[in-house]
Structures are given as C-alpha cells and as structure tokens.
Amino acid sequence: MRYPSCLIAPLAVLAFSAMGVSGQAETPIYMEEIKLGHEVAYERTSSGWPKMFEEAGSPDIYLAMQSISGPPMVWYVQPFENYAAEGRAMKAVEDNPALSAQLEGLWKEHGRPDLSGGDFPDLNLARFLNITIFRVKPGYDAQFEEAARTYAEVSSRLAPETSYRTYQVMTGMPGGAYFIFGSVDDYGGFDAVMARDMTVWEGMSDDEREVFDTFAREGMQSVITYRFRLSPTMSFVNAEMKAADPAFWSR
C-alpha cells in the first residue's frame, strides 16, 4: 500500500474545487522517487492503478504529476473533503480484498486565502505545474506569512493575471514547510508566468522589497522549485474531467 509522504492543508478558499471537492479539504500528497533508468517500467506499473480503481467503482480521484526537473519523481495529489472522507476511502480499500490484493501486487508506498493569489485555475486544463517548497526556520512562520501576503498584494496590483496556491504541510515533514503550486495549460505558458513574476519584483516599493529581504536574511531556511507534467495514464479522474479533454485523458 502507498501512504502519504505529507499532508497539506489548503490555504486557498476551496482547494481542488474544480475536482468536485468543497469545504475545508485535506489533501494528501504521495511522493515517489524513481530509480534512474526505471522511469518507463514505473509508468507501466503505475498505469494499472487507475484501471483497478475504476473497476472497483471508487469515487476518489487523484492526479499524477511527473517531474521534468530535478530527480525523477511522481507526486500523487488526492483531495478529500475532510479526514472522515479520507478514512472512508482507506476503509473501502481494506474492505475490498480483491482490490487490496491487486494494489499490493503492483507494489513490491486549513484555509488561508491571504497567502494565495489570483483565481483558482481550471484543473481540467492544467497540464504543467511549478511547485516551490519553502522551509522556514522555527519561530519565523509569521515572517513568511507577511512576505506571502505582500507578494499577493503586489501581484494583484501589478500583474492581476497571476495565479498560484499556497499550502502548509500539516504532517509527514518538519514544521515550517510551505508548498506553492502554479500551473499552466501548455509548457509555453511558463514564459508568461516568468514575465509576470519579473513585473512584480521590479514594481515593488522599497518597503515591500524590505519585507522579502528581511525574510530571506532571517527566516528562510531553504527554497527549491520542481517542475512537473500531469500524467494522464497514472491519474484517476472522474467523467467530468475526462469530458473536458477526451484526447488527453484517453492517452
């Protein structure tokens, strides 16, 4: 069985609302590292999961994202309305001996809109993602939040098309970890993302820039950015998402 490497709580108003999740969602992320040279075999194996869940009539969808920068990885993002819904999904697998056996056979693994920016993207069309992970020193979360709010305010003023979502890790990692998700419909869209980001940084006032300089100097422990492509073969989505782009999901 796979278990989440970490659990993130959405700091957006309705995280993954485009995937049919409402309320204060809980969003486990299953992170899988792949041995070099085993990418093709891994995808062939993992592509069996969606079919098994579909045959079992599972209502719980998930998206698979393959890294296109950094080490070979696949992240599985699975939204739930709450812990009770996640527990129901776990029990459904446990109570289905045939499904549990198949899955084992394949493997021999809280809302804060002020820290996010722009409209929530249409996840039916998102194909590539940037995910930046900030690690904050103990006791400096408030400083990170101030910097995040400042960026949201400046981007709203200078580059209103900017859209990203910030999440705080709740379990599975040391405290002070924040994930920032951004997505585009096609890879070339990252050019516009970088241009908007440059507009924001160049248009900040001295006081606004000092907020970031202070956080970088005092509160930031590390920052790293990964880039992913959404995998249609390793994801398990509902009929509504498939209908939005049948050609993509039928690959």
Image: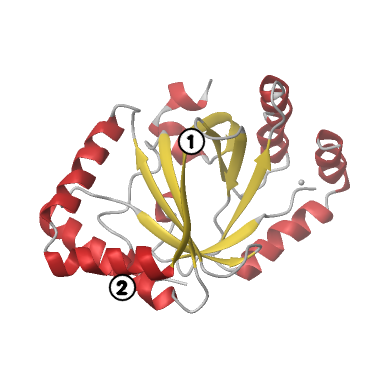
Quickly name the residue at label 2.
146
Against 218, residue 97 (above or below) is above
Q: Is residue 191 left or right of residue 124?
A: left
Residue 221 position in % (x across, y down):
49, 62
Q: Is residue 48 left or right of residue 98?
A: left
What residue sits 59% from the left and 34% below the top?
71
Against 203, residue 218 (above or below) is below
Residue 228 image label:
1
**Residue 34: quadrant of the picture:** top right
Instruction: Say if residue 20 shows up in the picture.
Output: no
What residue sits 37% from the left and 36% below the top?
125
Residue 72 position in % (x across, y down):
61, 32
Count of numbered circles on the image: 2
Provide the secondary structure element on which disc 1 rests: strand
Q: Which of pointers 2 and 1 lies earlier in the amino acid sequence? A: 2
Tell which of 56 and 213 is nearer to you: 213
Residue 170 position in % (x across, y down):
58, 68
What residue sits 60% from the left and 44% below the top?
76
Tell which of 202 and 57 is nearer to you: 202
Tell which of 8 and 154 is nearer to you: 154
Instruction: Say if residue 198 shows up in the picture.
Output: yes
CA neighbours of label 1 inside 10 A, class few (<14), some (14 to 19), many (20+): many
Against 206, residue 230 (above or below) is above
What residue sits 52% from the left and 69% below the top?
176
Q: Is residue 175 left or right of residue 37?
A: left
